[in-house]
């Protein structure tokens, strides 16, 4: 198996100010679930057929986080999100291309980045349909109307949450929070132990929501712990 690691500098960090975003990455056409799961605890993530890890100079804040699904207890606000979406039906199936899902994804991106052009279908396919692992697409419906779509990778003993998009007109539903709750339930239904939520970044408003799913564990130096104080986040990164 020929694996070539490459480094990319993406400019400013999207999570914390005055920091530089650098990744190490490689691409594979397929990967065993057991290998993928071990990479997650080392800080790797997946985007399309590319596996990447943040290796930013002077910073180690991106910390893998996972939820033990059998122990998860929703908070009051999370219970409200569940009640608010009591009319939502969720269907899980293979992560195949679907015009309706693509349209939802494009609408969601336009609402988040209005100055950017509409994403091309090819980019959508490369990002969320082409997968070197077993990936499920979770569709969220109100009646027959699609209001959300989420992608999760199926591991030997967990799910890895990849991406979630929702109808911008439904922003009051807290569908992002609700989708994590449904992914936790889906992992339970499959008899799995964990939901991997990607990176947790202390001090980042974009990432604070992940720590609200409790209990949770973070991986520090490849070891999982429930002690958040073990996270080593350098307070004095090199400036761009």
Image (cartoon, rainbow, N blue to C red):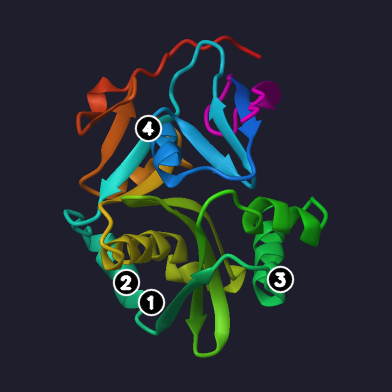
The x, y position of residue 36, in whole percent, is 45, 40
Q: Spatial distance from mark 4 to mark 2, Cα to Cα?
A: 29 Å
Disc 1, disc 2: CB below 8 Å? yes
**Is 6 part of what is drawn in magenta?**
yes
Q: Reading the chain from its start, which is encountered first: label 3 or label 2?
A: 2
Q: Main secondary structure of the magenta part?
A: loop
Mark sitting earlier along the chain (4/1): 4
Q: Residue at x 53, y 33 (%)?
A: 15
Using the image as rendered, state which of residue 216 and residue 20 is in the foreground: 216
How many neighbours does mark 4 have within 10 angstroms: few (below 14), some (14-19), or many (20 or more)? many
- Location of the N terminus by quadrant is top right
The residue carrying mark 4 is 41
Residue furthest to the front in view is 1
Residue 201 can be seen, yes or no: no
Residue at image point 43% right, 46% down:
33
Circle 3 residue: 103
- Among numbered discs 1 and 3, the one appearing first in the sequence: 1
- Mark 4 or mark 3, which has the lower sequence index? 4
Identify the element where label 3 is drawn.
helix
Name the residue beneath numbered marker 2: 82
- Residue 44 visible in the snapshot: yes
The boundaries of the magenta stretch are 1-19
Mark 4 and mark 3 residues within 8 Å of each other at the beta carbon: no
Q: Are marks 1 and 3 in contact (CB under 8 Å)?
A: no
């Amino acid at each position: 198996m020929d694996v070539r690691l490459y480094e990319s500098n993406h400019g400013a960090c999207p999570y914390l100010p005055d920091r530089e975003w650098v990744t190490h990455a490689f691409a594979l056409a397929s990967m065993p679930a057991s290998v993928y799961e071990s990479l997650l605890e080392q800080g790797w993530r997946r985007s399309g057929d590319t596996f990447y890890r943040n290796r930013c100079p002077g910073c180690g804040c991106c910390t893998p986080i996972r939820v033990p699904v059998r122990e998860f207890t929703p908070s009051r606000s999370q219970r409200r999100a569940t009640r608010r979406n009591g009319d939502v039906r969720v269907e899980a199936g293979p992560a195949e291309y679907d015009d309706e899902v693509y349209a939802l994804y494009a609408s969601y991106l336009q609402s988040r980045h209005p100055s950017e052009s509409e994403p091309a279908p090819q980019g959508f396919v490369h990002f969320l349909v082409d997968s070197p692992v077993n990936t499920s697409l979770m569709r969220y419906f109100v009646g027959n109307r699609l209001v959300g779509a989420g992608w999760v990778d199926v591991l030997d003993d967990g799910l890895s949450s990849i991406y979630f998009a929702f109808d911008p007109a439904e922003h009051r539903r807290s569908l992002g929070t609700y989708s994590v709750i449904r992914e936790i339930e889906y992992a339970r239904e499959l008899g799995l132990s964990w939901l991997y939520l990607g990176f947790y970044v202390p001090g980042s408003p974009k990432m604070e929501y992940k720590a609200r799913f409790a209990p949770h564990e973070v991986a520090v130096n490849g070891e999982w712990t429930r002690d958040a104080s073990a996270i080593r986040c350098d307070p004095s990164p090199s400036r761009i």
